Amino acid sequence: MSIEQVTVSKQAREQLIRLKRRTGIEHWNVLCRWALCRSLAEPSVPPATRHPADSNVEMTWRVFGGKHADLYLALLEERCLVDGMTPDPATVAQQFRLHLHRGISYLAADRSISDIDALTALAA
């Protein structure tokens, strides 16, 4: 297991708060799963920017992934391979953090997401 704890930056926390308000989704982990998948759907590699773990939004990997935690980990490992990276634990953890923050930013910036129906329409 390469990812034990999930903590987001203060900026990401503020974006998640806005998303919670807009969508009605109550749990951080659910929004973070959407954010990860949104970023993984983007063909480009997320920029290697620093995202400090300076907020009080934190959860274990198992809480983040729920019953599908192994699937999310496999998706991250596969994405590392697709992007030409070795899926070692440190790289997977780094890419997870980058994808999570990029996905949160994408969802927060998408003004068409005004409720949960609009969020689920992204998957269609």
Image (cartoon, rainbow, N blue to C red):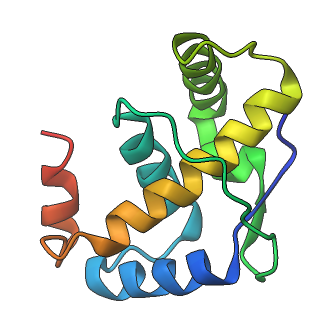
In the rendered picture of this protein, how many numbered marks are placed on residues?
Answer: 0
**Above or below — where is 43 with respect to 55?**
above
Q: Residue at x 76, y 62 (%)?
A: 59
Q: Is residue 35 visible?
A: yes
Task: Tell me which residue sits at (20%, 53%) in the image.
Answer: 120
**Is there any visible trace of residue 1 in the rendered image?**
no
Residue occupying the point 67% across, 38% down: 95
> Where does residue 73 sit, x and y in percent of width and height?
66, 27
Vertical placement of 18 versus 51: above or below? below
Foreground pick, 38 / 69:
38
Q: Is residue 107 left or right of residue 122?
A: right
x and y percentages locating residue 3 in the rendered image: 82, 39
Left or right of 7 in this view: 26: left
Please state, as top left, top right, bottom left or bottom right, where the C terminus lies in the image: top left
> At x 56% / y 47%, what residue is drawn?
47
| Side of 91 where 47 appears, left or right | left
Q: Quadrant of residue 77?
A: top right
Image position, residue 53 (x, y; %): 81, 70
Q: Which of the two residues, 59 or 46, is positioned nearer the viewer here?
A: 46
Quarter of the figure that contains the N terminus: top right
Q: Position of residue 15 (x, y in %)?
A: 47, 80
